[in-house]
Image: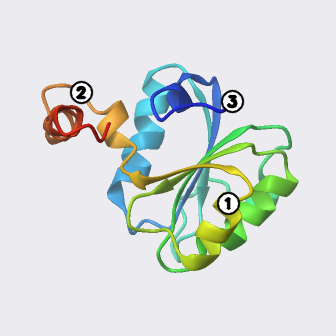
């Protein structure tokens, strides 16, 4: 039996793969760090930050949890590379899944259709409001 959406965030280490098109991905990485988690932030944008990992191939092996927010390239390509490195649980930012992602998710533990900040944002933010609405509607 796999994790549920809330339990995904209980791990100690995460790979976060971003192309800077979805601000919530960087916010999620920052929030995970604030919570004392180890975060391997992969910046696949055309202007990667100086202190970031610049390719999925540079990620250490054995990290089980990944968060992916890519729109400028096929997320399934990053997923395949991460699976080879040992990723087991993959969170795909809402509205960024593709047919190739859905195909991979049929064979792997994936979390799709939701924003990570709905789970990580503070109660006194738009993310907290989003969380409250999702709980009321049974979509949390």
Position of 128 compared to 36: left or right?
left
Q: Residue at x 33, y 41 (%)?
A: 117
Q: Is residue 74 visible?
A: yes
Q: Residue at x 34, y 57 (%)?
A: 23
Distance in Å between CA atoms under marks 2 and 3: 29 Å
Q: Which mark is residue 122?
A: 2
Residue 125's x, y, as percent?
Answer: 14, 35
Residue position marked by numbered label 1 in the rendering: 106
Q: Is residue 55 visible?
A: no
Mark 1: give few (<14), some (14-19) or many (20+) Cα within 10 Å: few
Distance in Å between CA atoms under marks 2 and 1: 32 Å
Of callouts 2 and 3, the N-terminal one: 3
Of callouts 1 and 3, the N-terminal one: 3
| Colouring used for the render | rainbow
Of callouts 2 and 1, the N-terminal one: 1
Q: Quadrant of the N terminus?
A: top right
**In the structure shown, which secondary structural element does the residue marked by tag 3 occupy?**
loop
Residue position marked by numbered label 3 in the rendering: 1
Position of 69 compared to 58: left or right?
left
Q: Nearer the viewer, mark 2 or mark 3?
A: 3
* Pointer 2 with pointer 3, Cβ within 8 A: no
């Amino acid at each position: 039996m796999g994790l549920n959406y809330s339990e995904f965030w209980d791990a100690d280490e995460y790979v976060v793969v971003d192309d800077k098109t979805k601000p919530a991905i960087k916010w999620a990485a920052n929030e995970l760090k604030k919570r004392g988690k180890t975060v391997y932030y992969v910046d696949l944008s055309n202007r990667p930050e100086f202190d970031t990992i610049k390719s999925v191939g540079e990620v250490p092996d054995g990290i089980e949890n990944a968060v992916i927010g890519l729109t400028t390239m096929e997320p399934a390509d990053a997923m395949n590379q991460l699976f080879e490195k040992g990723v087991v649980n993959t969170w795909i930012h809402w509205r960024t899944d593709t047919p190739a992602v859905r195909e991979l998710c049929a064979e792997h533990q994936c979390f799709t259709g939701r924003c990570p900040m709905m789970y990580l944002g503070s109660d006194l933010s738009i993310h907290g409001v989003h969380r409250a609405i999702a709980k009321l509607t049974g979509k949390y």
